[in-house]
Image (cartoon, rainbow, N blue to C red):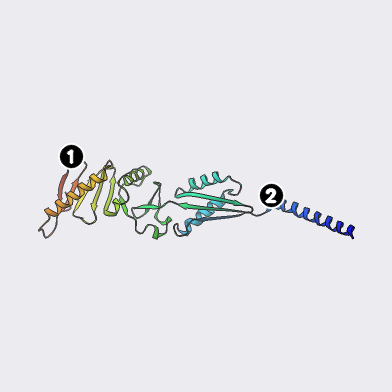
Amino acid sequence: MKGWRGFLVGIGIMCVGRELVHAQHIMGEKMPHVLTISPTSSTVLMPSIEKNISQNIHGYDGISLQPALMQKIIIDTFPFIRSVVIQKRLGHSKISYHVYKPLIIYNDALLLLENGKSVPLNFYQEKNYKTIPSLTITEPCSNTALSKVFSFTMRLGVNFFKNYSVTWHNQHCIEIYDIQCPDITCIIDETIDELSYLSKKITYLKQEVTRLNEGRKKPLHYKADLRFAGQIVLSVQKGGKI
């Protein structure tokens, strides 16, 4: 009986050994590896953009590449992605990513992101930019122009654009007017760097224009040029011209 038991144990060990070798062969060469790709939130990007990201990542050898290299490739390819987390387990890799928040809308077509990059408006779901302020750019939106607009935007701060309508013609001519007081337009350039000083000037001008228009049936529209040191050039618009 002991002999039979030993014989059966020996067969069992041989069978297990063969299965392990077979499993190792599959794992090393043929076992399919599942790659899951998903954003940390599915309510930010449009589904078509998420699909495009997934397809591009699947195009890389995301299984064998080192995580740090894969993270760099993804962020370089998609500059609106803030961070990437890669988790690897036997037979399964998971890549999740977090995207930058949009700050301002340019020309109802582009979104300025936290990192200074811009992407088409339709990259993000509407609820993520529905309430953010906007800025109009009349000059061609080259990379150089957008870089200057971004620096200007960051100096003034996003909250500034919640109260003022801004039109960027070029770095030397930027028109702004208070949303609550459309009777005056101020002209500044990109060198403005002291928001509190600018706000004080605009507040003063609003008071002056209100005084000048007091009692008028049809208020006049004024333009105030603030690009000169130590002075304000105030003019009234007549017949569509200053």
Q: Does 5 sit above or below residue 199?
A: below
Q: Which residue is labeled 1 in the image?
A: 230
Image coordinates for residue 145, horizontal then vertical, percent = 34, 44
Q: Residue 96 vs residue 175: left or right?
A: right
**Residue 35: assigned label:** none
Q: Which residue is labeled 2 in the image?
A: 28
Amino acid type at circle 1 is Gly
The answer to which quarter of the image holds residue 179 is bottom left
Q: Residue 132 vs residue 173: left or right?
A: right
Whether residue 210 is visible here, answered yes or no, is yes
> Crowdedness of circle 1 by 10 Å Cα count: few (<14), some, many (20+)?
few
- Helix, strand or loop for disc 1: loop
> Crowdedness of circle 2 by 10 Å Cα count: few (<14), some, many (20+)?
few
Q: CA distance from mark 2 to mark 1?
A: 75 Å
Whether residue 238 is visible here, answered yes or no, is no
Amino acid type at circle 2 is Gly
